[in-house]
Structures are given as structure tokens and as C-alpha cells.
């Protein structure tokens, strides 16, 4: 199977790399992290102007006729070299929720959301997880009851809603058929400006990392939504979300690859100039071998991710390959963050090295989008176990 990038995808890669060098220097990223502020929206509007939200969007709204998973992953890898949490902001709209609206939203919802996504103007968030429904997400209890006039009355609570505080649009998952078993009977709803809605209490959670893409808890009390807020088919929300999981997991794999490659690049630059025992650290065998092992992990994770994109483009799905990519990318990021900090020694413990940022951001990619244990269960079933 050919994993080589096309000329167009190589151009995307080069354009993204230049953007990262110009717009996202390490000092700027770390300043945002230290101040716990989200990056300016103008940054994402620039990405929209560059066409970097087009990969999975329909041409009717400024996207393209055929989706380009490989182009998206190529871009994501370059952006993640600067910051995995910043790349998460991009992906909420451009990879996960924008395509969901494109596939299942009503024409009115698409007109409202998709032009803003393509332009890089829409922050999007999803409210899925609950205190008793994490990896077992289909056990959610937030309840939506349809009223006589067709509107919906919603009550419940949500956890880990990334960027909900500043979101322009929130996709809310709620149970609409209490008698249905688990994933049957769940529906999706579109909410504008959730933090400004008096029926939604939005509270930022203190987390060890991902400061550029903060996460929130939501308390929902007697939230009324019009009938037009329903996304797709009633009671089919879970099945609608599953349609996008392959892309989400490939995207997570690409984040891991890009972030890990960025760590390796920083480590190599450091060990070339840092001298101990009368020579650069990079000349010590123990150091060189660790870096080679890091790079081997990145190359393997990249191949898993690229293969998933190739299979998806050919067959329309890649469940097995997506899980391989998710596991490999997340675990490679975690390994390289730890090893990179270790190889940088005392400097790696200093915030300005960037390693503490990577160390605090990496763990969430082994949890979100399907924990490592869930991915291995998926692959075990593929093996007939």
C-alpha cells in the first residue's frame, strides 16, 4: 500500500510548517500556557484563510468535493509539533464536530455552522461524558423530553467538555428514550453559545495540562431547545457519533506523531550543543540510542496513521487501523515526553524547555477519544478474542 504524500499534500505540509515557524514560536506558546489563556481566534481565522479547514468539509460550504484524510493528518502533524492542545482546538471544529454537522445536520444547521468552521471562526465543543459515563459513554443519563409544542426540555450534567466556556456551538448528547438499552435512545442537539445560556452552568476544571484547550463541567437545568436543535434522527445520536470515530482516532494518532517529533527535534538540538565529559551529549552512546528508539516509535506511529488514512480513503472505514493509530500515537507521545525530559536533564525540568508542557499534555491522549484499554478491546475483538 502506497503511503507516499501527493504533491498537494507535500505542499500542505510545507505551508503548515512555515505557519508554525512564523506564528507559533515556543516563547509565545509557553506564554499562553503560563497565563492559562486560549490562543487568539485570529490564529484560527488565518488557518481558515489558508484552507486548512477544508479537508473534511463539503464543497458547498467552501470545502472540497472529496474528503482528504491524508491531507488533514499531514497538516495536524505539523501543527502538533508546536502544541498538542492548540491542535485540539482546531480538531474540535475541523475534524470531529464540523464533519458531524456536515453529515447529519439539517440544512439550516449546516448553513449556520459550516461556513464559520471553514473560515476558522467557530469554536465547537461536545458534551458527552458524565460522572458515571466515561469509557462507558452510552450509559449517559442527561435527559431530553419532548414537549407538546415539539421543543425539548433537558436536564443533567456533563464533564470534560473541552472549550465549552468559549464555544460558539455545543453538540449535546442526551437520552431521548429512557426505555432503550444504552446506545439506543440517545440523540444529539446543537446549542449556540452554551456559556451564555442561563440554563447552563459552565465551570472550568483545573487540569494538569491542556491549558490552551481548557475543559469544563456543565450543569443543565430546565434547558429549553427548539425542535430544530435536534441533529439528525431522534434516538440515533450514538450511531451518528460512531461514524466519525475512525477520523477522530486517526487525528489523535497524528497529534501524537507530531508532538513526539517536535520533542525529538528539540532534544537533538539540545544534545548537540550541551557538553558533558568533554564532548556534546549527542556523542554519548546511551543518549544517541535513546533518541534513535524515540524516532523508531514515531516512524511506526506515523505509518499506522498514514495506513489508516489510506484504508479510509479506499473503503470508507478503518476501525482496526484507527485503533492502532490511536494507541501508537498516544503512547509514543507519552514515551517521548518522558524520555525527552530525561535527556534534557535539569533544563528539561525548566518551563522554557517546553518539556513540562509536553509532560502535562501527553497523558490526556491516552484517555480522550477512547482510552488505551478500550482501543485494545476493539483490536482484541478484531482478532476473534
Image (tube, rainbow, N blue to C red):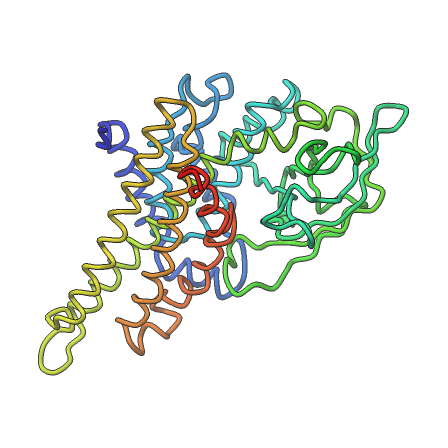
Q: Position of residue 65 (x, y in %)?
A: 41, 17
Of 336 and 195, the residue lying toward us:
336
Image position of 339 (left or right of 284): right
Q: How many numbered circles are shown?
A: 0
Q: Where 213 sits versus 140, above or below?
A: below
Residue beneath the point at 58% across and 49% down? 135
| Residue 40 visible, this orientation | no
* Frontmost residue, 295 versus 40: 295
Residue 26 drawn above or below residue 41? below
Quadrant containing the C terminus is top left
Q: Position of residue 239 (x, y in %)?
A: 60, 29
Q: Residue at x 70, y 36 (%)?
A: 191
In the image, 128 versus 57, the foreground residue is 128
Give residue 346's quadrant in the image: bottom left
Compared with 202, 72 (above or below) is above
Can residue 142 be seen in the rendering of this structure?
Answer: yes
Task: Please give left or right for residue 193 compared with residue 16 in the image.
Answer: right
Residue at 37%, 37% (x, y): give it: 321
Residue pictured at 15% horizontal, 66% vertical: 288
Q: Residue furthest front?
A: 385
Quarter-of-image position of residue 291? bottom left
Taking the image as shown, residue 112 lies to the left or right of residue 373, namely right
Q: Which quadrant is the N terminus positioned in? A: top left
Residue 202 in the image: state x and y as whole percent. Answer: 71, 52
Amino acid at each position: 500500500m502506497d503511503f507516499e504524500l501527493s504533491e498537494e499534500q507535500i505542499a500542505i505540509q510545507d505551508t503548515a510548517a512555515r505557519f508554525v515557524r512564523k506564528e507559533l514560536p515556543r516563547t509565545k506558546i509557553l506564554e499562553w500556557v503560563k497565563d492559562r489563556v486560549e490562543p487568539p481566534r485570529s490564529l484560527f481565522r488565518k488557518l481558515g484563510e489558508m484552507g486548512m479547514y477544508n479537508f473534511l468539509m463539503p464543497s458547498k460550504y467552501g470545502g472540497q468535493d472529496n474528503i482528504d484524510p491524508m491531507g488533514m493528518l499531514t497538516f495536524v502533524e505539523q501543527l502538533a509539533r508546536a502544541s498538542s492542545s492548540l491542535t485540539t482546538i482546531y480538531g474540535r471544529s475541523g475534524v470531529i464536530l464540523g464533519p458531524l454537522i456536515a453529515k447529519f445536520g439539517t440544512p439550516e444547521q449546516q448553513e449556520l455552522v459550516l461556513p464559520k468552521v471553514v473560515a476558522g471562526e467557530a469554536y465547537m465543543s461536545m458534551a458527552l461524558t458524565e460522572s458515571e459515563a466515561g469509557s462507558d459513554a452510552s450509559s449517559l443519563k442527561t435527559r431530553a423530553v419532548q414537549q407538546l409544542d415539539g421543543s425539548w426540555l433537558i436536564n443533567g450534567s456533563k464533564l470534560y467538555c473541552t472549550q465549552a466556556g468559549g464555544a460558539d456551538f455545543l453538540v449535546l448528547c442526551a437520552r431521548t428514550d429512557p426505555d432503550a438499552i444504552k446506545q439506543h435512545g440517545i440523540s444529539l442537539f446543537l446549542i449556540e453559545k452554551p456559556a451564555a445560556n442561563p440554563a447552563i452552568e459552565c465551570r472550568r476544571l483545573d487540569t494538569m495540562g491542556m491549558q490552551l484547550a481548557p475543559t469544563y463541567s456543565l450543569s443543565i437545568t430546565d434547558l429549553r431547545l427548539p425542535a430544530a436543535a435536534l441533529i439528525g434522527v431522534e434516538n440515533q445520536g450514538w450511531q451518528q457519533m460512531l461514524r466519525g470515530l475512525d477520523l477522530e482516532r486517526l487525528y489523535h494518532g497524528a497529534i501524537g506523531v507530531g508532538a513526539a517529533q517536535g520533542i525529538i527535534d528539540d532534544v537533538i538540538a539540545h544534545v548537540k550543543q550541551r557538553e558533558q565529559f568533554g564532548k556534546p551529549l549527542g556523542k554519548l552512546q546511551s543518549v544517541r540510542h535513546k533518541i534513535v528508539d524515540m524516532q523508531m516509535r514515531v516512524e511506526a506511529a506515523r505509518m499506522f496513521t498514514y495506513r489508516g488514512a489510506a484504508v479510509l480513503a479506499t473503503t470508507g472505514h478503518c476501525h482496526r487501523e484507527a485503533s492502532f493509530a490511536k494507541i501508537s500515537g498516544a503512547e509514543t507521545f507519552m514515551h517521548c515526553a518522558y524520555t525527552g525530559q530525561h535527556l534534557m536533564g535539569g533544563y528539561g525540568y525548566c518551563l522554557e524547555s517546553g518539556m513540562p508542557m509536553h509532560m502535562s499534555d501527553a497523558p490526556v491522549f491516552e484517555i480522550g477519544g477512547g482510552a488505551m484499554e478500550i482501543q485494545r478491546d476493539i483490536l482484541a475483538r478484531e482478532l476473534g478474542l
